Image (cartoon, rainbow, N blue to C red):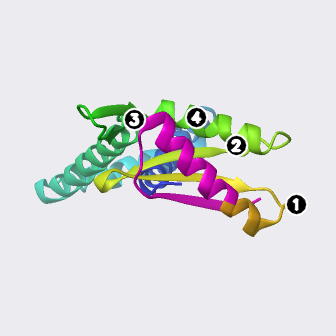
């Protein structure tokens, strides 16, 4: 999992816990008089924090949280393209095209398996393919075969002749 995805998931988890907890507390206070008294005491305590310095700190925290969430959202959903130099002009290849070729390759290589697959473009147009390795195969032979065949496939179909990173996790 990419760091942007993990951080975005963590921030969404904190948001979820905050809003669900606040909602549960408000619903509980609506039906319980002792809890309603506790909420009123909490509100009176919070009114004491309404100094400009405290409000500025809270404002900066909430604003920063929103900006980080927005940036991570943009990073997670941006389109990524791989730039390949051919004999003619350069060509941009969408991630989904590479995903389809590699997915079809793994379907023919391992017909009984359906490994999860992720394509990542690193800086300087470095391609990384992440997937899981089945347990019951000879790993060294399989790795050599994937390295050779996938390299040829990417070169022939897409014109990608650079090195690529193949990250295999054991299932």
Label located before the other in sequence (2 or 3): 3
Q: Looking at the image, how many numbered discs can be counted on the residues?
A: 4
Tag 2 near tag 1, CB within 8 Å: no
Q: Nearer the viewer, residue 102 or 162?
A: 162
Side of 99 where 104 appears, left or right:
right
Residue situated in front as seen by the camera: 19 or 106: 106
In the shown orientation, is residue 138 left or right of residue 79? right
- Is 109 rendered above or below residue 171? above
| SS at mark 4 in the image | helix
Residues at marks 3 and 4, CA–CA distance in whole angstroms = 21 Å
The residue at the point 58 percent across, 32 percent down is: 100
Name the mark nearer the viewer: 3 or 1: 1
Judged from the image, the secondary structure of the residue bearing numbered disc 1 is: loop
Rendered location of residue 71, percent (x, y): 29, 44
Q: Which image quarter holds the C terminus? A: bottom right
Q: Position of residue 136 (x, y in %)?
A: 88, 60
Q: Disc 3 designates what residue?
A: 77
Q: Are marks 1 and 4 in contact (CB under 8 Å)?
A: no
- In the displayed orientation, state which residue is furthest to the front: 87
Mark 2 → mark 3, Cα distance in angstroms: 25 Å
Q: What is the quadrant of the N terminus in the image?
A: bottom right
Q: Earlier in the sequence, mark 3 or mark 1?
A: 3
The mark found on residue 101 in the picture is 4
Q: Residue placed at 42% from the left, 44% from the top?
A: 160
First reached walking from the N terminus: tag 2 or tag 1: 2
Q: Nearer the viewer, mark 1 or mark 4?
A: 4
Q: CA–CA distance between discs 4 and 2?
A: 9 Å
- Classify 10 Å Cα crowding around label 4: few (below 14), some (14-19), many (20 and above): some
Q: Which residue is mark 1?
A: 136
* SS category of the residue bearing label 3: helix
Find the magenta span and give its range.
145-171
In the shown orientation, is residue 50 left or right of residue 136? left
């Amino acid at each position: 999992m990419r760091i942007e995805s993990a951080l975005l998931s963590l921030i969404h988890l904190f948001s979820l816990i905050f809003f669900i907890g606040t909602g549960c507390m408000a619903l509980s206070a609506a039906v319980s008089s002792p809890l309603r008294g506790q909420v009123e005491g909490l509100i009176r305590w919070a009114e004491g924090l309404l100094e400009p310095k405290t409000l500025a700190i809270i404002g900066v925290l909430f604003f920063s949280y929103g900006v980080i969430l927005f940036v991570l959202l943009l990073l997670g959903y941006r389109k990524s393209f791989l730039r390949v130099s051919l004999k003619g002009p350069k060509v941009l290849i969408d991630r989904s095209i590479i995903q389809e070729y590699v997915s079809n390759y793994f379907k023919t290589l391992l017909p009984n398996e359906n490994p999860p697959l992720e394509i990542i473009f690193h800086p300087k147009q470095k391609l990384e393919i992440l997937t899981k390795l089945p347990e019951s195969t000879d790993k060294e032979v399989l790795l050599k075969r994937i390295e050779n065949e996938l390299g040829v496939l990417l070169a022939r179909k897409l014109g990608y002749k650079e090195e690529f990173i193949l990250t295999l996790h054991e299932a």
